């Protein structure tokens, strides 16, 4: 979905997309977005490629803010918020960073556009900050529901 947002930002025409793998058809491949002319070593491709990881990082920051600022009394809602805003984006960030080393990730082409050093540094910084935020949240909520935050009421 966020690759599609990147395409909209740069004005690329989307020719095909898949938001999630079609497991029921026996297709266990990845979600994808195909753009007219394909992705190349240019700034438009860079924006399309990194938009998911920027949005994932922003999502973790929003999740951290929500979960530290407000006391969510409903356990299901708390877990869902943590999962959607923190764990899902962290998985995406770490999974694609590891994918660089197996030559299978959006960040492989990103490293060809902006250089390996910048891409690896961004990945390490992004993973580290995201992981620290999540560990701080886990530490804060280890005695849930006895957490000192402001109530949503």
Image (cartoon, grey):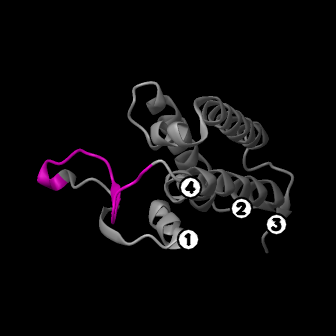
Q: Magenta residues, as a range? A: 24-40
Position of residue 2 relative to residue 57, above or below, is: below
Which residue is label 2 attached to? 72
Q: Secondary structure at mark 1?
A: helix
Q: Are marks 2 and 3 in contact (CB under 8 Å)?
A: no
Residue indicated by mark 3: 151
Say which of 150 and 54 sits in front: 54
Q: Name the image quarter holding the N terminus.
A: bottom left
Nearer the observer: mark 2 or 4; the answer is: 4
For the residue labelled by badge 4, is the local secondary structure a helix, a strand or a loop?
A: helix
Q: Which mark is residue 131?
A: none
Label 3 SS: strand
The residue at the point 33 percent across, 53 percent down is 31
Q: Quadrant of the C terminus?
A: bottom right
- What's the distance in space between the residues labelled 2 and 1, CA to CA? 34 Å
Q: Residue at x 20, y 51 (%)?
A: 23
Q: Earlier in the sequence, mark 3 or mark 1?
A: 1
Q: Give the alpha-carbon distance from disc 1 to disc 4, as whole Å.
A: 12 Å
Of labels 2 and 1, earlier in sequence is 1
Contact (Cβ within 8 Å) of mark 4 with mark 3 = no
According to the image, label 4 marks what residue? 43
Label 3 environment density (alpha carbons within 10 Å; few <14, some 14–19, many ≥20): few
Q: Which mark is residue 9?
A: 1
Relative vertical location of residue 117 with respect to residue 35 in this rendering, above or below: above
């Amino acid at each position: 979905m966020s690759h599609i947002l990147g395409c909209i930002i740069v004005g690329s025409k989307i020719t095909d997309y898949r938001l999630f793998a079609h497991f029921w058809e026996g297709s266990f491949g990845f979600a994808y977005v195909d753009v007219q002319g394909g992705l190349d070593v240019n700034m438009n491709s860079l924006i399309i490629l990194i938009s998911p990881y920027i949005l994932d990082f922003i999502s973790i920051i929003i999740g951290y803010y929500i979960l530290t600022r407000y006391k969510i009394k409903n356990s299901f809602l708390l877990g869902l918020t943590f999962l959607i805003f923190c764990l899902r984006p962290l998985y995406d960030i770490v999974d694609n960073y590891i994918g660089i080393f197996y030559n299978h990730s959006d960040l492989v082409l990103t490293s060809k556009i902006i250089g390996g050093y910048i891409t690896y540094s961004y990945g390490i910084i992004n993973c580290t900050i995201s992981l620290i935020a999540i560990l701080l949240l886990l530490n804060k909520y280890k005695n849930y529901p006895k957490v000192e935050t402001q109530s949503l009421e």
